[in-house]
Image (cartoon, rainbow, N blue to C red):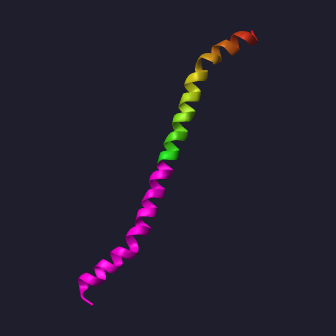
Amino acid sequence: MKTMDIINLVAIIFSPIIAVIVGQILQNNRKKRADKLEIFKTLMINRGLAGLLIAFEL
């Protein structure tokens, strides 16, 4: 086997594995960002309620 054949064989074996790992990393990053955005939205929705709740306690 030539060197180029060995390189092609290694690429054929490892490229799907690397693609799955990269896909998983991207999916994890997307999930973290979505979670942060959800927390931000909740905080922005509820920020006006803090003053209202304090007024009710008085």
The picture quadrant where one finds residue 53 is top right
Provide the major secondary structure of the magenta segment: helix
Q: Residue at x 33, y 74 (%)?
A: 11
Q: Residue at x 41, y 66 (%)?
A: 18
**On screen, 18 above or below 24?**
below
In front: 17, or 54?
17
Q: Residue at x 55, y 24 (%)?
A: 44
- Picture coordinates of residue 47 (x, y %)? 59, 20
In front: 9, or 55?
9
Q: Quick check: is 53 in the magenta stretch?
A: no
Q: Which residues are magenta?
A: 1-29
Q: Is residue 24 left or right of residue 54?
A: left
In front: 50, or 4?
4
**On screen, 58 above or below 40?**
above
Pick the quarter of the image with the N terminus. bottom left
- Picture coordinates of residue 13 (x, y %)? 39, 76
